[in-house]
Image (cartoon, grey):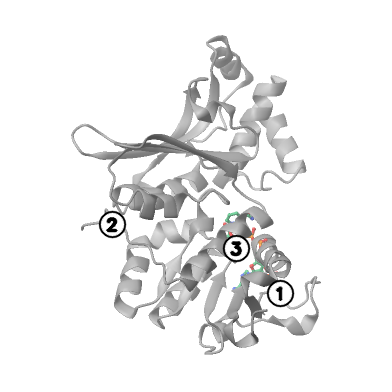
Amino acid sequence: MISDKSRLRIGLIGFGCVGQGLYDILQQLPEFGAVVKRIAVKNPTKSRTLPADRFDFHADDLLTDPDLDVLVEVIDDADEAFRLVSTALRNGRQIVTANKAMVAHHLPELVELQQAHGGTLLYEASVCGSIPIIRTLDSYFGSEPLHSVGGLFNGSSNYVLSRMTEEGSDYGPALAEAQALGFAETDPTLDMGAFDPRSKAVILVAHAYGVLLNPDQVLNLGIENITAQDIRFAAAGGQKIKAVASLQRLADGRVTVFVTPQLVGPASPLYAVEREFNGVVIQAAFADAQFLRGRGAGGHPTGSAVLSDLAALRHGYRYAYHKHTA
Ligand SMILES: NC(=O)c1ccc[n+]([C@@H]2O[C@H](COP(=O)([O-])OP(=O)(O)OC[C@H]3O[C@@H](n4cnc5c(N)ncnc54)[C@H](OP(=O)(O)O)[C@@H]3O)[C@@H](O)[C@H]2O)c1
């Protein structure tokens, strides 16, 4: 039995898909020893799955509450997320986020704030949902040179391309189906235009190669112009078209990063990653090839990554950014 005193006290900012997912997981895992003490949301009139008195509407109050051990920021507004996370770090706090756009656009500043004020930020949920790729790169492969890291970082675009391949359909109907089933947003630009996987590539390149980039420095080509004819052309050569993020160390030492539609053959483990799933292949100097596959989104899969960050924080873990020298 875990005493109330030793429970990790969480301040949860955002109670949508991911926030609710984390809450459910913690309810199902009392042995984890954590309690969600306060929850901040935005809209006071929205109906909730918990009693009204469980909710705050001023996230800033949580940032300064000394009775909270850790903050979890899972809101859908990247600018506000940066304001909240950077304020928390300035106060030396421990915070977990899932916001890839926010992390990708502000990584140098977020690293500096941790160094200057002693706080910690973890963000495993921001890349490929449930797949433990950031800590794998940062810690496990922190010392080993990597030839490449590549993968399918966006379940929505992968779903659309899978359906186009299965049905022989064009982009429009496959997108409409993905939207109807909740696998794609009403505004598909971020996912189909490869802006979302570009943010994830920017985060991974910091941990894989120690390079801090701005998303604008990374080429992203979306899948909006892929046609049924393109898919048939690929299939005639035994290949599929996938939206692949590529991070690569070139022979001259330079690192290239881009996200584009690419032909993928059956020799690649990514060939069999279909629909809403994500996959990452790491090509390491000594370990050789490693492959991780899993759910890239959804309340419970993404909540699982947040849970793992909470456990890591409890043990004093922080990203080492081993390969970052500048
Ligand atoms: N959904 C996924 O599968 C997934 C996967 C990986 C990463 N992520 C990332 O996780 C984050 C959250 O995504 P989500 O899908 O859970 O979003 P969501 O379902 O749209 O929920 C967003 C939540 O944030 C709250 N919120 C917005 N602005 C706020 C503010 N200023 N103060 C307090 N609360 C505020 C909203 O409040 P109200 O309830 O009052 O509207 C809502 O509860 C995003 O950065 C997303 O990119 C999501």
Q: Amino acid at mark 1?
A: Asn
* x and y percentages locating residue 166 in the rendered image: 69, 22
Ligand 1 within 8 Å of the CB at mark 3: yes
Q: Which type of secondary structure does the marked residue at label 2 adopt?
A: loop
Q: Are marks 1 and 2 in contact (CB under 8 Å)?
A: no
Which structural element holds mark 1? loop
Q: Nearer the viewer, residue 212 or 266?
A: 266
When the figure is inspected, residue 7 is found, relative to residue 81, above or below; the finding is below
Residue highlighted by disc 3 = 76
Whether residue 246 can be seen here: no
- Is label 2 or label 3 in front? 2
The residue under label 1 is 43
**Outermost residue, front side:** 1
Count of numbered tags: 3
**Residue hosting label 2:** 322
* The residue at label 1 has a CB less than 8 Å from ligand 1: yes
Residue at 32% x, 63% y: name it. 108
* Residue at disc 3, secondary structure: loop
CA gap, disc 3 and disc 1: 13 Å
Tell me the distance, in whole angstroms, between the alpha carbons under discs 1 and 2: 41 Å
In the image, what residue type sits under mark 3? Asp
**Residue 316 seen in the figure:** yes
Q: Is residue 234 above or below residue 83?
A: above
Badge 3 density bin: few <14, some 14–19, many ≥20, Cα 10 Å = few
Dot 1 or dot 2: first in sequence order is 1
Image-quarter location of ligand 1: bottom right
Q: Give the Cα distance between marks 2 and 3.
A: 30 Å
Q: Residues within 10 Å of mark 2 (few under 14, many from 20)?
A: some
Mark 1, residues whose alpha carbon is within 10 Å: few (<14), some, or many (≥20)? few
Q: Residue furthest left?
A: 252
Q: Is residue 78 left or right of residue 295?
A: left
